[in-house]
Image: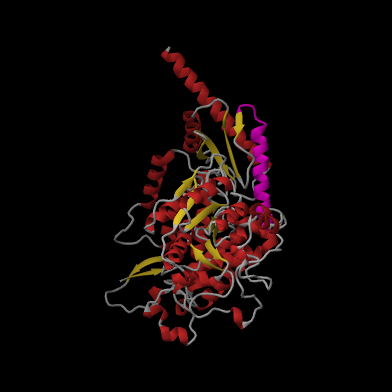
């Protein structure tokens, strides 16, 4: 057999018993795990540092072919007959991936909703990997399951602040119109309204887990991200409609995330009814007309709080009012914009969010967590009961009756890693105020960049940023110029810009998620793009001159 040790792989005689000297350092957990991990983590950190130096910027130069060649050269044989040893394997492969990474901690790596993780979150993720709880049954995750329940309920209360309050009114969720909704969400985020849940959060046994995985109060589930959370929103709406003898029709704006359409397909629903969004957001009048056309059929309205292309936020309060007038459910995809709730100053941009039937939001975007850290929140945990499922080896009925928590209904997945640990550590380390400062700083940087772009002759700003996305293009430039400049910067390893098709044209997209980005970084980005445009235009003119 081959045994894995701190020094590498050592061949042992056939039939040798496990547990001998050669097995020291084999496992990451247990009493000996920390000692085994310590030198390996030192190797990892050294490789990360070396890789960043070798890369020398936001991503490696050379493009796909060159990067692929370097990785293949470093990896060698993926499955060798005899291993290279732990230190050598970590040094080579971690170093190669680091040198070939698109590093979101670099200020000029700003194309996607791809955040630089907090150091404290990454450190916590090491512990999660070492302990390796599986979140599908209590006997695999005794402490982690409790922590997950605590974090989920706290984040759910952030989304639905009235759902656990003593002022909750069972009829309020289906009753208020647009004016009432807008009035109860102030710019400061104060809670003056009511919510559907009649269970108050008093910290007593009345609000504890029921043993079936559901909770009397606002609750949330951990997801792999917005795609899974959106699928859950559609699934619950489908089940509610079928329980009433109908079939739900999904209604969304043209600005909705592609996962809404994919989820409808996966769930066997009709393709979503897509409402045009010429101004970038789903407008109440357009939604009203779409719902009128359904003539009272069960409907789920999917609104967006932070679109992928521009970061725009739909007018949530007004949309909920329109939906309620038609008896429709509302799911809000706040995977991008949800973390604005940490900020008293910015949460007013999400006015009306707390009146939704379900909300998806991620902390691996504007929350600085390693992937994955998604959540799906509902104002009343009872809404999650359609997800309940029984597998005798995980949640036998007699075990549940005896008091063992039932975790299987907490996800569509079975095996799940404890992604909640890094989130819990980050929230404990920074607090709400610390998270708010990071969100506010990042959104402020987007405003600074937008002002720089608007003040640059030759650039056209699409719109003032709603969150942290800035979209712009060269004045008079065609789509080929926009695409070519983006690829030019990628090929050289100078910058990572996104692209967005808006209004019939192609635009550059800068998605700022680095809270440490400095004004000098923003100025450098604008100058770099400006120079790349000038270079591309000059090259094109030279080619045209030669052809003439």
In this rendering, the answer to whether 55 lies above or below 362 is above
Residue 168 drawn in magenta: no
Q: Nearer the viewer, residue 141 or 374?
A: 374
Q: Nearer the viewer, residue 354 or 226?
A: 354
In this rendering, the answer to whether 291 lies above or below 126 is above
Q: Nearer the viewer, residue 422 or 58?
A: 422
Color style of the picture: secondary structure
Q: Position of residue 374 (x, y in %)?
A: 52, 60
Name the outermost residue toward the front. 295
Horizontal side of 275 relative to 199 (left or right) equals left
Q: Nearer the viewer, residue 176 or 365?
A: 176
Name the outermost residue toward the left. 14
Q: Position of residue 174 (x, y in %)?
A: 58, 63
Q: Which residues are magenta?
A: 436-458
Horizontal side of 81 relative to 129 (left or right) equals left
Q: Name the residue: 62% across, 36% down.
A: 524
Residue 442 drawn in magenta: yes
Majority secondary structure of magenta residues: helix
Q: Quadrant of the C terminus?
A: top left
Q: Quadrant of the N terminus?
A: bottom left
Q: Position of residue 97 (x, y in %)?
A: 45, 51
In which quadrant of the rendered view does residue 509 lie? Answer: top right
Q: Position of residue 455 (x, y in %)?
A: 67, 31
Question: Residue 154: in sight, yes or no?
Answer: yes
* Count of numbered circles in the view: 0
């Amino acid at each position: 057999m081959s045994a894995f040790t701190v020094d590498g792989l050592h061949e042992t005689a056939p039939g040798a018993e496990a547990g001998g000297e050669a097995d020291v350092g084999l496992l990451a957990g247990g009493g000996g795990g920390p000692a085994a991990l310590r030198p390996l983590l030192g190797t990892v950190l050294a490789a990360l540092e070396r890789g960043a130096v070798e890369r020398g910027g936001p991503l490696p130069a050379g493009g796909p072919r060159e990067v692929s060649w370097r990785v293949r050269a470093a990896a060698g044989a993926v499955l060798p007959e005899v291993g290279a040893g732990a230190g050598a394997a970590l040094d080579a492969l971690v170093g190669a991936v680091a040198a070939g990474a698109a590093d979101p901690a670099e200020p000029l790596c700003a194309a996607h909703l791809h955040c630089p993780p907090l150091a404290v979150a990454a450190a916590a993720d090491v512990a999660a990997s070492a302990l390796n709880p599986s979140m599908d049954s209590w006997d695999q995750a005794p402490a982690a399951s409790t922590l997950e329940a605590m974090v989920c309920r706290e984040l759910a209360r952030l989304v639905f602040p009235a759902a656990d309050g003593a002022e909750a009114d069972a009829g309020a969720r289906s009753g208020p119109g647009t004016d009432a909704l807008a009035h109860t969400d102030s710019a400061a985020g104060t809670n003056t309204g009511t919510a559907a849940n009649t269970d108050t959060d008093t910290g007593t046994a009345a609000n504890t887990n029921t043993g079936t995985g559901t909770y009397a109060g606002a609750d949330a589930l951990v997801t792999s991200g917005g795609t899974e959370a959106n699928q859950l929103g559609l699934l619950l709406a489908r089940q509610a409609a079928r329980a009433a003898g109908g079939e739900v029709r999904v209604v969304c704006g043209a600005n909705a995330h592609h996962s809404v359409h994919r989820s409808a397909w996966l769930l066997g629903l009709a393709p979503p009814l897509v409402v045009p969004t010429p101004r970038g957001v789903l407008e109440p009048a357009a939604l009203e007309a779409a719902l009128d056309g359904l003539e009272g059929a069960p409907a789920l309205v999917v609104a967006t709080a932070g679109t992928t292309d521009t970061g725009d936020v739909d007018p949530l309060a007004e949309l909920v009012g329109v939906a309620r007038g038609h008896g429709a459910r509302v799911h809000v995809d706040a995977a991008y914009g949800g973390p604005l709730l940490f900020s008293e100053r910015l949460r007013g941009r999400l006015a009306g969010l707390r009146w939704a039937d379900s909300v998806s939001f991620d902390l691996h975007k504007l929350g600085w967590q390693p992937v994955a850290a998604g959540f799906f929140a509902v104002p009343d945990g009872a809404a999650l009961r359609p997800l309940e499922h029984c597998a005798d080896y995980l949640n036998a009925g007699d075990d549940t009756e005896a008091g063992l928590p039932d975790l299987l209904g907490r996800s569509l997945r079975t095996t799940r890693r404890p992604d909640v640990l890094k989130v819990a550590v980050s929230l404990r380390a920074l607090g709400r105020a610390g998270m708010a400062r990071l969100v506010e700083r990042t959104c402020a940087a987007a405003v600074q960049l937008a002002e720089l772009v608007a003040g640059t002759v030759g650039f056209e700003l699409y719109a003032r940023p709603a969150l942290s996305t800035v979209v712009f293009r060269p004045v008079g430039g065609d789509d080929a110029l926009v695409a070519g400049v983006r690829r030019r910067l990628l090929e050289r390893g100078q910058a990572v810009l996104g692209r967005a098709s808006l209004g019939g044209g192609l635009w550059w997209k800068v998605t700022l998620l680095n809270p440490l980005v400095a004004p000098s970084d923003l100025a450098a980005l604008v100058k770099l793009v400006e120079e790349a445009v000038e270079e591309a235009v000059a090259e094109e003119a030279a080619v045209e001159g030669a052809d003439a």
